[in-house]
Amino acid sequence: MLFSLCTSQLVGEVGELSEIFQWKGEVPKGLPDWNAADKEHLGEELSDVLLYLVRLADICGVDLGDAALRKFKKNGLKYPVQRSTDYAHGFFDDNNNNKVRGLGFEDSQ
């Protein structure tokens, strides 16, 4: 019951966080165009998400620090810097070690 309640609350807070950005599109780093009140509201919603996430991890017996470090290592192997950089610049690997321009899923439609 506690798990279900906590996940529902976490999802609700993520929804509130998402709502802040819903109509803003991409925003520049540091949010230079945002006023102090909007930044404070964002901080509050981010904090709510963090607190529910930490509580959920505690309920489940997951050490978030250890889990995050393991995930960083896994992602480093799965997405090496060069591959990630290529993807960010619009290239993908066509499974034959050829870099191809595009999104990578054109022929899967």
Image (tube, grey):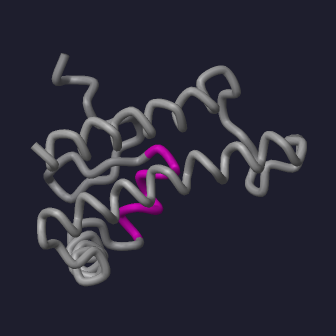
Q: In the rendered image, which quarter contains the N terminus? A: top left
| Camera-nearest residue between 85 and 35 | 35
Residue at 34% x, 65% y: name it.
54
- Residue 64 or residue 80, whichever sits in front: 64
Q: Position of residue 7 (x, y in %)?
A: 24, 43
Q: Is residue 36 magenta?
A: no
Quarter of the picture containing the C terminus is top left
* Residue that lies at the very extreme toward the top in this rendered image: 109
Q: Quadrant of residue 98?
A: bottom left
- Residue at 88 percent across and 48 percent down: it is 36
Give 12 or 66, whichever is nearer the viewer: 12
Horizontal arrangement in the rendering, residue 8 relative to residue 83 (left or right): left
Q: Position of residue 52 (x, y in %)?
A: 37, 54
Q: The magenta stretch spans which residues? A: 82-90
Q: Relative to 26, is 29 above or below? A: below
What residue do we see at 15% from left, 48% from top? Answer: 2
Q: How many marks?
A: 0
Q: Residue at x 25, y 80 (%)?
A: 73
